[in-house]
Image: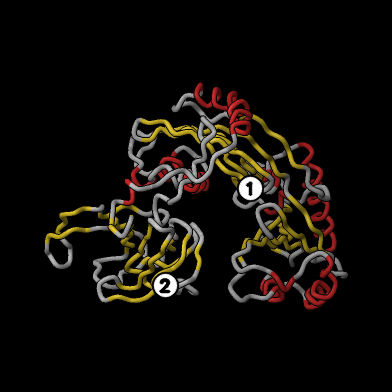
Amino acid sequence: MTKVLSLFICLFVTIQNSWANELPFHDLFSAPKGAESSETNMPFWIGINKDYNKVKSHQAFKDVLRNSHCSAATMEAIQKNCGHTFNIGKISAGAEYCVLSPKVNDSIFPPSFLIYNEDKINYVVFDLNDATGKATRYARPVVIEDKIAAGIVEGSIWETFDKNNINPDIASQLSDIFAYTLNFFKVKKGDKFKIMYTEKLVNGESIEIMDVKAVLFNYGGKEYYAFANKNGNKTDYYDEEGKSLKMKFLMAPVKYSRISSKYNTHRLHPVTGVVKGHFGTDFAASQGTPIFATASGVVEEAKFGVYNGNYVKIKHDKVYETQYLHMCRIAKGMRPGRKVSQGEVIGYVGSTGLATGPHVCYRFWKNKKQVDPFKEMGAKASFMSKAEQDAFIANIRPVKAELDAFDYTAAHPVLDTFMVKMPMDKDLIVAVEKGK
């Protein structure tokens, strides 16, 4: 056993040193070609057995160690001594971990290392051979890339992003950037986009969209620009003329939905079968989807009605009011007199009252009269001063030129790359690269 363990540790040293030579992980942990063939003269093959698992709900770290066949002495040492490196009381359900054990031919020996993934970047290695319960913290190298992506919508924008290998988180950010300007529920086949953004990658996998710098969205044949303007920790978006993309009202009270019924003065009611005015816009969404206040204001009503179901009505100013019907439940704290902010959750999609399925009926009043919200979006929320506007336009000019020149069907080039150096101890990174 001692000889096997020594060979195993030597193999680990080789793995650590190989990082400098950029050897691929799957080659390091594979048997030499033909080693397991009956034609080879090799008497035995020493390797590493990798056992991948996830922390279960309500599972304690001692249970993870026990299930990994750790000795009682090692378990006690780790629980007693690794507190300065890792808080074993704060492991997360669903977190991945890997147990590495020496392997000779088909014989697997007691485990030597346990690697716990805290997140996509950070992980902790527990040396199960060390009587002191040694734990060492590591970080994978992070690559930051400035990119430009483009495409033509086929189906939904999310499906298009997936097909073009673009991180779908960007779609969510675009929805927020253009929340006051574009109706993403009406994006159609043939609409086009170009996006300049910064992406964080680990081992070639996108783990975060750090920021979206510029966007050109061709929506229904009309071009819409968005350019980031950072002010401290806050980022706002402006068009090519330096005008804010923010408006008084959001385009919709829910995300990731579709319009199932528009404002219509002569609609056949799906429940009663009577033709009458439908003075709201229905957004179909899954049960429990958060509903947002489309503008800041004061809650006028938050209660149940026979036809409206659970609903909230908000007064925004002397002119405008909005109402949100058929909630499965009203958000906690919503009551008359309560101030709410634009984008704040006021309730959750349901089908209470006179409704055939889960949706929110969004009603919009102007001077006490119900109107079509898409014709009453109001003025833009804020503008730059003339001097700020001129400086902004000058700064975005080369960015806009690059965006305009890029083809909608072109490949997605990396504009700039740099490595973020993480403190680490000659990478055991390779030990947790599952599936490679």
Disc 1 crowd, CA 10 A, few/some/many (<14, 14-19, 20+): few
Question: Residue 413: x percent and y percent?
Answer: 57, 29
Residue 205, can we see it? no
Q: Quadrant of the N terminus?
A: bottom right
Identify the image quadrant of residue 326.
Answer: bottom left
Q: Is residue 289 left or right of residue 386?
A: left
Residue found farthest to the left = 274
Residue at point 84%, 67% (across, down): 84
Q: Residue 90 got which mark?
A: none
Residue at point 50%, 61% (across, down): 344
Kindly identify the amino acid type of the residue bearing the numbered disc 1.
Lys
Question: Residue 122: x percent and y percent?
Answer: 72, 55
Contact, CB < 8 Å: mark 1 with mark 2?
no
Residue at point 79%, 39% (across, down): 20
Q: Quick check: 111 above or below 121?
A: below
Disc 2 crowd, CA 10 A, few/some/many (<14, 14-19, 20+): many
Q: Nearer the viewer, residue 158 or 236?
A: 236
How far apart are labels 1 and 2 at the CA level? Answer: 30 Å
Q: Is residue 3 left or right of residue 305?
A: right
Residue at point 43%, 58% (across, down): 317
Q: Quick check: 289 above or below 407?
A: below
Q: Residue 330 got which mark?
A: 2
Q: Which residue is mark 1?
A: 234
Q: Is residue 318 left or right of residue 2?
A: left
Task: Identify the secondary structure beneath mark 1.
Answer: strand
Q: Nearer the viewer, residue 319 or 209?
A: 319
Kindly identify the amino acid type of the residue bearing the numbered disc 2.
Ile
Q: Quick check: 322 above or below 158?
A: below
Identify the image quadrant of residue 384.
Answer: top right
Task: Identify the secondary structure beneath mark 2.
Answer: strand
Question: Residue 348: x percent and y percent?
Answer: 41, 67
